[in-house]
Image: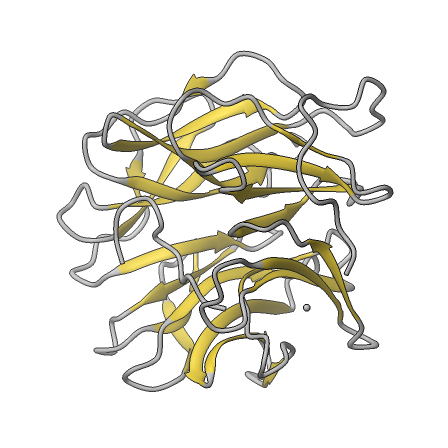
Amino acid sequence: MGGSLLVVLAACGSGAVGPASSPPLASSLPPSDLVYEREVNGNQDLYVLPADGGPERRLTTHPSVDGLPRWSPDGRSVLFASEREGHWQLFEVAAEGGEPRRVRATAFRELQADISPDGGRLAFLSNADDHEALWTMNRATGVATAIVRHGARSVLGNPHWSPDGSRIVFSSNHRIGHQIYVVDVAAGEVRRISGLTGGGCEPRFSRDGRSVVYVSRGHRRPTSRLVRHDLDSGQETVLVDWPALNYSPVFSLDGTDIAFSSNINGEWAIYRQRLSDGTAWRVPTGPGPARYPDYRPVLR
């Protein structure tokens, strides 16, 4: 894997058939910033843009690939992965920009990180055990522990903490294609929530922790759907079923819409969709492929 993807492209109808030409005129969605990766002239960096429109600003400027951004829980910094040290490592940059700091200095391939809601722990992927596994780290002490190991040939992806910090959702190709799993962090118990025939990747918890949205591609189909899975009932609802590759979904702060990436118009771009009626529109980023959006939490 490399370039702007940096994610597991793996592989249930409602959902709009495509985006509107402009945002809804009347919107009750709360204001927030989106951070995302965008490629310009062959170089990928991080950018920030008001979700409802406004001036875009560049957050990183290194000639190496920067990607997979996630806001910190307090909204004051962005965690991301970069090859600027010659191999994938984790960095954090202030929301206003500036020089990023290295989160962990290791000789291993480490990426796709997420900070726990209380800010005290980090979930990330590392091959420190000679193969990729899901790790957590105490941010105060730096002590790291592998909590999910799925075998030497397994590829994991996109860990995300539940709002109460008790669980982590992630993807893995441990058995048949990529599937969605949830691990209880304290007990270490892992369960699969995606269907074997549909597969899944790039999962994110809802803001109330009751559901997970993820990408279902059915093991390399030419298009993908965004699916919401209710964790109590197991019921699944298709949110986006455009005739395209649709990836990287994330719920808005109040859970009333999702932001995601799609190549519906031929190039990767960021879109938002209101969940109440399926109205969708493109977020006006600058030129070049844009992917992997994340909503900025309310500053605290």
Residue 26 rendering spot, x and y as whole percentages: 85, 20
261 is higher (above) or lower (below) than 243: above
Say which residue appears at 49% left-offset and 42% top-offset: 263
176 is higher (above) or lower (below) than 258: below
Residue 159 seen from this side: yes
Say which residue appears at 15% left-offset and 45% top-offset: 85
Say which residue appears at 53% left-offset and 43% top-offset: 262
Q: Is residue 137 left or right of residue 27?
A: left
Q: Nearer the viewer, residue 266 or 101?
A: 266
Residue 119 seen from this side: no
Q: Is residue 168 left or right of residue 290?
A: right
41 is higher (above) or lower (below) than 270: above
Residue 143 rendering spot, x and y as whole percentages: 36, 65
**Toward which corner of the image does residue 274 lie, by quadrant?**
top right
Residue 236 rendering spot, x and y as whole percentages: 76, 69
Q: Nearer the viewer, residue 25 or 133?
A: 25
194 is higher (above) or lower (below) than 141: below
Q: Nearer the viewer, residue 21 or 296?
A: 21
Figure coloring: secondary structure
Say which residue appears at 24% left-offset and 71% top-offset: 128
Residue extending furthest top?
55
Residue 45 rendering spot, x and y as whole percentages: 33, 31
- Total of numbered circles in the picture? 0
Image quarter hosting the C terminus: top right
Image quarter hosting the N terminus: bottom left
**Toward which corner of the image does residue 124 lie, by quadrant?**
bottom left
